[in-house]
Every structure is written in C-alpha cells, then in structure tokens.
Image: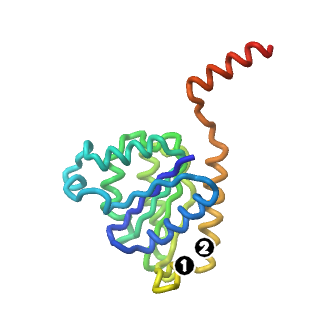
Amino acid sequence: MLVVSLAGSPSERSRGGVVLDKARAWLEARGVEVVTYGVRDFDAQDLLYARFDSPSVLRLREHIAEADGLLVSTPIYKASIAGALKVILDLLPERALADKVVLPIANGGSEAHLLAVDYALKPVLAALKAQEVLQGVYAVDRQVSYAEQERPARLEDGLQQRLDDALAQFHEILLRRPRTLAPETLYERLVQSRWSI
C-alpha cells in the first residue's frame, strides 16, 4: 500500500509539516509506505513557468499514479490554500486523483479559517477526480509545537485525537480498496479455478 504525502508550505519549518510527520509515522507503523514531497522539492522556475515535463513533477505524477491515497497539507493564507501548492496541483493531469482517497490537512492562525479546507482545497481535489475526499483535519497553529532540544514535536491532545481518528478512517478505506492483480497472478488463478470446477 502506497500513500503520497504532499506538504504545501514553502517554509523550511512548518506546523503542517509537523502534522504530516505525525501522520506518516502513524501510517508507517501500520505497514503503509509513505513517499513525501514538499513544495520546496520543486524548482521555482518549473512552477513559475508551468513545466509539465520537469523531472520532479514527472516523479510526483508517477508516485501519485501508483499510490492508493494522498495526504495533502496546506497552510491557510488570507483564507485560501498556499499558492505554490495550487501550482503543483495544477501541473497534475486532470484525472490524477481518480481512484485515490485523499485526506486534506490544513493549519492556520485561528479557527476562523476552518472552512477554507471545504471551499478552497476540496474543490481542487474534486477537480482532479479524487474518488473520496475525507473531511480533513484543521490545526490551529497554537496546537502544534516544534521540536526543541531534547523535546520532540508534539500536537495538543485534541488535535492528536482528531488526526488519529481521521487516519484510522483513511487507513480503513485504503484497506477496503480492491487490489489490482499482476497479469501472471491473474492467469495462475484463472488456471487453478478452471481445474477446481
């Protein structure tokens, strides 16, 4: 099972990144492979000039095509998602998220921007034909603490519980998804079933 994690903050250190790290650790503890990307992994010129053939964009597209699900995190700026994240999503093919389950994650300075996930991020994910976009997790900045000296990064208990609940739902949906069989496995099963009739 493969999940792509996409961090939308252009900052070197971000609260959304802390939440994504916690989500990645949760999924990996349950045997899910997580491939991580951030807007800083893409050349600014490639984003500015919408270079669909950029090696980093092509690599992201390949990973998303192989993935079962996607975690997308964005800071909320002026009641909307990060512009660099929107540019990256614009570089994906129209049906890039078809058959994918998506868990949106956002963070902002106050609860006032909570609905930005619904009116700014989810429509973009729906336009990419995501099979299912979960309710998502919104974090207020004060609920996320960066790692300092020997103290690890942490989330306030309420936020950690909401993230755990969302990840449990995300993981359960991923487990229910039908798996594609390799052609040789399909052939072998067909041959065996023919003889068992």
Q: Is residue 163 depicted above or below 146 in this figure?
A: above
- Label 1 – label 2 distance at C-alpha: 8 Å
Residue at left offset 46%, top offset 54%:
35
Q: Residue under label 2, please give it.
A: 160
Residue 78 lies in quadrant: bottom left
Q: Residue at x 63, y 79 (%)?
A: 157
Q: Nearer the viewer, residue 114 or 72?
A: 72
Residue that extends furthest to the front in the rendered view of this protein: 150
Q: Residue at x 46, y 85 (%)?
A: 148
Check residue 109 in the rendering and tell me which mark sits there, or answer none.
Answer: none
Quarter that holds the C terminus: top right
Side of 100 relative to 80 (left or right): right
Residue at image position (32%, 44%) is 58
Nearer to us: label 1 or label 2:
1
- Report which quarter residue 191 is drawn in: top right
Mark 1, residue position: 154
Sequence-earlier tag: 1 or 2: 1
Q: Position of residue 123 (x, y in %)?
A: 44, 53
The x, y position of residue 155, in whole percent, is 56, 77
Where is residue 49 drawn, in percent x and y?
19, 51
Query: Dot 1: what SS?
Result: strand
Mark 1 packing: few (<14 Cα in 10 Å), some, or many (20+)? some
- What type is the residue that disc 1 sits on? Arg
- Reply above or below: 177 against 110: above
Residue density around tag 2, few if under 14, some if 14–19, many if 20 or more, within 10 Å: some
Q: Position of residue 151 (x, y in %)?
A: 52, 84
Are circles 1 and 2 on residues that touch, CB within 8 Å? yes
The kind of residue tagged 2 is Gln
